[in-house]
Amino acid sequence: MFIIKHKKIFIGISIGLVVLSLLSFFVFGLNVGIDFKGGALSEVVYGGPRPAQADLNQSLKTLNFGTILLQPTGDKGYIVKTRDLSTSEHALLLETLSQKGLNPLTETNFDSIGPSVGRELTRKAILAIILISLAIILFIAFAFRKVSKQVSSWKYGVIAIITLLHDVTIPIGLFIVLSHFYGAELDTLFVVAVLTILGLSVSDTIVIFDRIRENLRNLPTNSDVNFSEIVGKSLEQSYVRSICTSLTVIIVLLVLFFFGPATTKYFALMLTTGMFFGTYSSIFLASPLLVWVEEWQKKS
């Protein structure tokens, strides 16, 4: 009952973190990658020791190609992201990366993505998130239709979506800060991370909601036990399982972050943050919101 008793504090913490994340968006904005705005991606591997990233960045600035993002990959390679390049500009880029032939390299991959493809990816990403949210509301409304006396079943779904927005907004805020200070770009892996967070977080919330449903269904007729006590009891029965399940996933993601390839580090960090706050919201936000809604209904 500790969580339910102090529900205003935990809801306030969540609101504060969401506000900070939204502020980071308005202050820094999103650093959109070539997957969405169009551009070129080149991956090169050096035959000998890889040149220092700082030296290459200085050389690339002289090309006047606009913003160029250089990311180490493996032991001897770099991934280079630029605006769309002509054939001559592409050749000049490779010549600069090889430091005019002093450091021979092999280009293992080159992709060019037009702006129209980027717009299509953006539209599909937004549509996917909207459809997933609607599916979650409909599923929860149907599953909880027999325990809607205290709180309507569709409100369980709405609260689940609110917690999901919380779980996604905070990692996005972290990503925006990283993109501003470290050059992280919003790409298709970012969208995959957001969709994965939606799926993992809602499962945690549904586990606790399902425990509340079972305890409500098992109440004797005309029982005097109030709704907040049922929610508190349900949390006590399920929060350990929820935390342990999330920890196993977080440990794997942290291993991927520290020991995985450079290209997946931000992806792993996004998922780790999403899992952490997804677990937090399932325990400290979703259930207190249910009690708050039930209390508000009584007063109105």
Image (cartoon, rainbow, N blue to C red):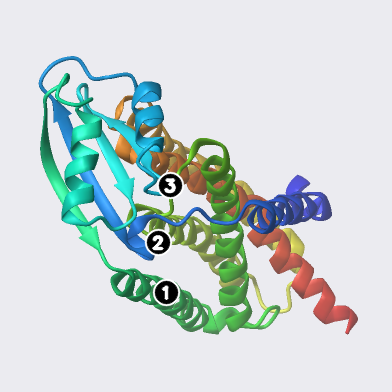
Real-space Cα separation, disc 2 to disc 1, in angstroms: 9 Å
The residue labelled by disc 3 is: 67
Can the viewer see residue 271 in this picture?
Answer: yes
Identity of the residue furthest to the right in this view:
299
* CA neighbours of label 2 inside 10 A, class few (<14), some (14 to 19), many (20+): some
- Residue at 39% x, 40% y is 268
Real-space Cα separation, disc 2 to disc 3, in angstroms: 28 Å
- Secondary structure type for disc 2: helix
Can the viewer see residue 238 in this picture?
Answer: no
Left/right placement of residue 57 relative to residue 230 reads left
> In the rendered structure, which disc, 2 or 3, sits on the residue that comes first in sequence?
3
Left/right placement of residue 78 relative to residue 156 reads left
Residue 132 - label: 1
Q: Amino acid at mark 3?
A: Thr
The residue labelled by disc 2 is: 195
Vertical order, 48 against 43 (above or below)? above
- Residue at 71% x, 65% y is 289
Q: Amino acid at mark 1?
A: Ile
Relative to the observer, which residue lies in front, 72 or 266?
Answer: 72
From the image, state whether disc 3 or disc 1 is nearer to you: 3
Vertical order, 158 against 289 (above or below)? below
Real-space Cα separation, disc 3 to disc 1, in angstroms: 35 Å
Whole-percent x, y for residue 205 in the image: 53, 60
Whole-percent x, y for residue 59 in the image: 35, 30
Asked whether disc 2 touches disc 1, contact meaning CB atoms under 8 Å apart, the reply is yes
* CA neighbours of label 1 inside 10 A, class few (<14), some (14 to 19), many (20+): some
> In the rendered structure, which disc, 3 or 1, sits on the residue that comes first in sequence?
3
- Residue at 53% x, 78% y is 144
Left/right placement of residue 208 relative to residue 232 reads left
